[in-house]
Image: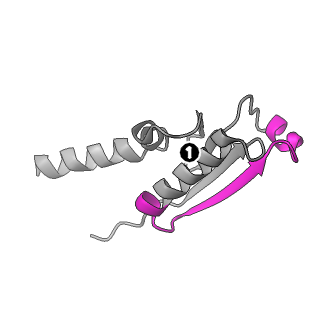
């Protein structure tokens, strides 16, 4: 059975080229390349040049990664260096663990 993969819509809010912002972007790109394999759209928003977007989306700290789709919306604050926390926040690790359990049960 060939199941369609989910498409992810992500927004990364950064504040200029600070070390934490650069680290978050690089880490996220690495995770996306390994885990998402092209089924995502990423928008990077610099809150210094677009503060209204951060205000509209209620972003209080940077860097913040927001998963918009699929629901529910989730936000992860920090430089994204904890890969497991990021995968759990994006509902990827939970799904993988669930799929492994289902395979073991069959």
Q: Position of residue 100 (x, y in %)?
A: 21, 49
Q: Residue placed at 83% from the left, 44% from the top?
A: 53
Closer-to-camera residue (106/44): 44
In the rendered view, does 75 fall on the left or right side of 35?
A: right
Q: Secondary structure at mark 1?
A: loop
In the rendered view, does 4 fall on the left or right side of 76?
A: left
Residue sitting farthest toward the top: 60
Closer-to-camera residue (36/28): 28
Q: Position of residue 7 (x, y in %)?
A: 53, 61
Q: Residue placed at 70% from the left, 35% from the top?
A: 62
Q: How is the image coloured?
A: one colour
Q: Residue placed at 57% from the left, 53% from the top?
A: 26
Q: Residue placed at 47% from the left, 59% from the top?
A: 6
Rendering quarter of residue 48: top right
Q: How many marks?
A: 1
Query: Badge 1: few (under 14), some or many (20 or more) residues near its Cα, within 10 Å?
Result: few
Q: Position of residue 45 (x, y in %)?
A: 76, 50
Rendering quarter of residue 84: top left
Quadrant position of the N terminus in the picture: bottom left
Query: Can residue 67 be seen from the camera position used here?
Result: no
Residue stretch in magenta: 33-56
Up/down of 6 relative to 65, above or below:
below
Rendering quarter of residue 91: top left
Query: Can residue 35 be seen from the camera position used here?
Result: yes
Check if residue 36 falls in the magenta segment: yes
Identify residue for label 1. Answer: 71
Q: Position of residue 85 (x, y in %)?
A: 44, 36
Check if residue 54 falls in the magenta segment: yes
């Amino acid at each position: 059975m060939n199941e369609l993969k989910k498409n992810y819509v992500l927004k990364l809010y950064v504040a200029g080229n600070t070390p934490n912002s650069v680290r978050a972007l690089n880490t996220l790109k690495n995770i996306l390349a390994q885990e998402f394999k092209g089924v995502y759209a990423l928008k990077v928003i610099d809150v210094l040049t677009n503060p209204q977007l951060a205000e509209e989306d209620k972003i209080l700290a940077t860097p913040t990664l927001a998963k918009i789709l699929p629901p529910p919306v989730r936000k992860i604050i920090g430089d994204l260096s904890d890969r497991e926390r990021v995968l759990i926040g994006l509902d990827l690790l939970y799904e993988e663990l669930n799929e492994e359990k289902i395979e073991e049960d069959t």
